């Protein structure tokens, strides 16, 4: 029986040391476990946020593309209406001028009357060119707005990606700091 007591004493001492080691390791494991869980949750939350941002931006781009197409179509329809009105007004102006020439006894095919009629055509063409330039400016403005929105969306996505990368880098460091704070 004398040999069992020292073995039992050593076993109790070993269990005591094991309990101390376990009690020391357990908080460390919890901190590290929480840190890694936190990292995983953060990563999935970041991925979810990025995914939602991308979906939202895709929807916005589709809506903006539709709105841009409608605006462009409206500009083109108005341009066609304006062109029809310009031609109609030109025909009326030419008819009025020929009637004036005829009532005053001037031949509408003569040199001076022809110069007046050419002046009407040139004036009408200048109006047409000015309107076309304005329409082109409007169309370009719509395209530039769309391009600018795409750039902003790209910038937002990249900022979120960089923020996520920073969190991924900082999260394990915070876990290590928490581990070191125990001691």
Image (cartoon, rainbow, N blue to C red):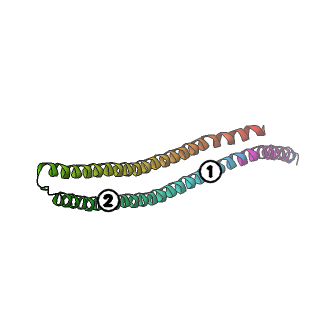
- Which quarter shows the C terminus? top right
- Please report contact status of discs 1 and 2: CB closer than 8 Å, yes or no: no
Q: Secondary structure at mark 2?
A: helix
Q: Quadrant of residue 174?
A: top right
- Res. 146 mark: none
Q: Secondary structure at mark 1?
A: helix
| Disc with the residue nearer the chain's start (1 vs 2) | 1
* Label 1: few (<14), some (14–19) or many (≥20) C-alpha neighbours in 10 Å: some
For the residue pair 10 and 99, the one nearer the viewer reads as 99
Residue sitting at 54 percent across and 52 percent down?
Answer: 50
- Res. 82 mark: 2
In the image, the segment drawn in magenta is: 8-30
Rendered location of residue 14, percent (x, y): 80, 44
Q: Quadrant of residue 91?
A: bottom left
Decide whether the magenta segment is chiefly helix, strand or loop. Answer: helix
**Within the magenta stretch, is there residue 110?**
no
For the residue pair 101 and 168, the one nearer the viewer reads as 101
The relative height of residue 60 versus residue 178 in the rendered view (above or below) is below
For the residue pair 167 and 66, the one nearer the viewer reads as 66
Counting the numbered discs, the total is: 2
Rendered location of residue 161, percent (x, y): 53, 46
In the rendered view, does 8 fall on the left or right side of 175?
A: right
Rendered location of residue 9, percent (x, y): 86, 45
Q: Residue furthest front?
A: 104
* Label 2: few (<14), some (14–19) or many (≥20) C-alpha neighbours in 10 Å: some
Residue sitting at 71 percent across and 38 percent down?
Answer: 177
- Mark 1 or 2: the one toward you: 2
- Res. 42 mark: 1
The relative height of residue 10 versus residue 41 in the rendered view (above or below) is above
């Amino acid at each position: 029986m004398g040999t069992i007591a020292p073995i039992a004493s050593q076993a109790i001492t070993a269990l005591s040391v094991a309990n101390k080691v376990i009690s020391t390791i357990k908080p460390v494991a919890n901190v590290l476990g929480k840190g890694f869980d936190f990292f995983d949750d953060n990563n999935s939350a970041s991925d979810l946020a990025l995914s939602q941002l991308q979906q939202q931006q895709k929807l916005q781009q589709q809506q903006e593309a539709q709105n841009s197409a409608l605006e462009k179509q409206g500009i083109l329809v108005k341009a066609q209406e304006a062109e029809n009105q310009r031609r109609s007004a030109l025909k009326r102006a030419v008819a009025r001028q020929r009637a004036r020439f005829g009532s005053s006894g001037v031949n509408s095919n003569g040199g001076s009357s022809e110069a007046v009629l050419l002046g009407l055509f040139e004036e009408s063409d200048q109006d047409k060119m000015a309107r076309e330039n304005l329409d082109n400016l409007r169309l370009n403005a719509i395209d530039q707005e769309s391009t600018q929105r795409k750039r902003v969306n790209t910038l937002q996505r990249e900022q979120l990606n960089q923020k996520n990368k920073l969190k991924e880098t900082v999260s394990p460091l915070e876990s290590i700091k928490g581990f070191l704070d125990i001691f």
